Image (cartoon, rainbow, N blue to C red):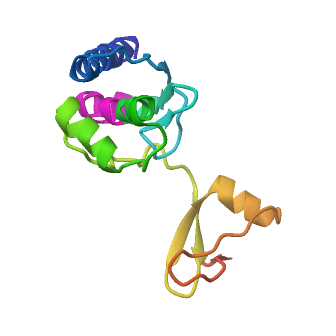
Amino acid sequence: MRQLKMQVQRQLKRNLEQANHYFNKGFTPPTVSYAVRGEKAGVAYLQRNEIRFNPVLLAENKQAFIQQVVPHELAHILVYQQFGRVQPHGKEWKMMMEQVLGVPAETYHCFDTRNVIGQQFAYQCGCQTHYLSIRRHNAIVRHQRRYICKQCKQTLTFKDNL
């Protein structure tokens, strides 16, 4: 894992140099941690100037992760530093990915997530079955949250016949 983290740092440095050269300025390098769990490969915290990566997906997808996810998350940070708050995957981010970093502007990864998903719970609405994480399931059971389908606007109900 140490070797992979060093490769991530090298990729970040290369991409930062590309952006510095393109814009003729010195962007502030983000801090990096490996604290993302679940299906997300990475998350950029704009105001904190921080990127968090999923260590399991990094270990399982090595080069593809480094070539896709690292520039993707850094692009969010760079866009925020250059343009301020804009659409997360809007025209500024696409330009940063393609013209500045030379990477296809893909918004989702296609990594196998079976090893990071965890237990899922089936919930039903009027139009489909939704699979919720244990965290969301527990929030419903404890009457702390309720979830509504984005399509049919109905409240999700537990489907206990699995």
In the rendered image, the residue lying farthest to the bottom is 126
Q: Is residue 70 magenta?
A: yes
Q: Is residue 134 above or below residue 111?
A: below
Q: Quadrant of the N terminus?
A: top left
The C terminus lies in quadrant:
bottom right
Q: Is residue 69 magenta?
A: yes
Position in image of residue 25 (x %, y %): 32, 16
Relative side of 70 to 124, left or right = left
Nearest the eye: 32 or 99: 99
Please state the horizontal and vertical placement of residue 15, each as a whole percent of the image: 27, 21
**Quadrant in which residue 133 is drawn:** bottom right
Q: Position of 115 compared to 141: left or right?
A: left
Q: Residue at x 38, y 29 (%)?
A: 78
Residue 48 locus on image (x, y percent):
58, 27
Picture coordinates of residue 130, whole percent (x, y): 53, 71
* In-front residue for pair 25/154: 25
Q: Main secondary structure of the magenta part?
A: helix
Q: Is residue 162 visible?
A: no
Comparing 150 with 5, the one in front is 150
Q: Residue at x 27, y 23 (%)?
A: 23
Is residue 46 in sight in this rendering? yes
- Give the quadrant of residue 9: top left
Please determine whether, in this image, residue 29 is positioned above or below residue 95: above
| Residue depicted at x 24% and y 34% | 64
Q: How many marks?
A: 0
Q: Is 28 on the left-hand or right-hand side of 97? A: right
Along the horizontal axis of the image, is 29 left or right of 136?
left
- Residue 157 position by quadrant: bottom right
Read off the magenta span.
57-72
Between 17 and 142, the one nearer to me in the picture? 17
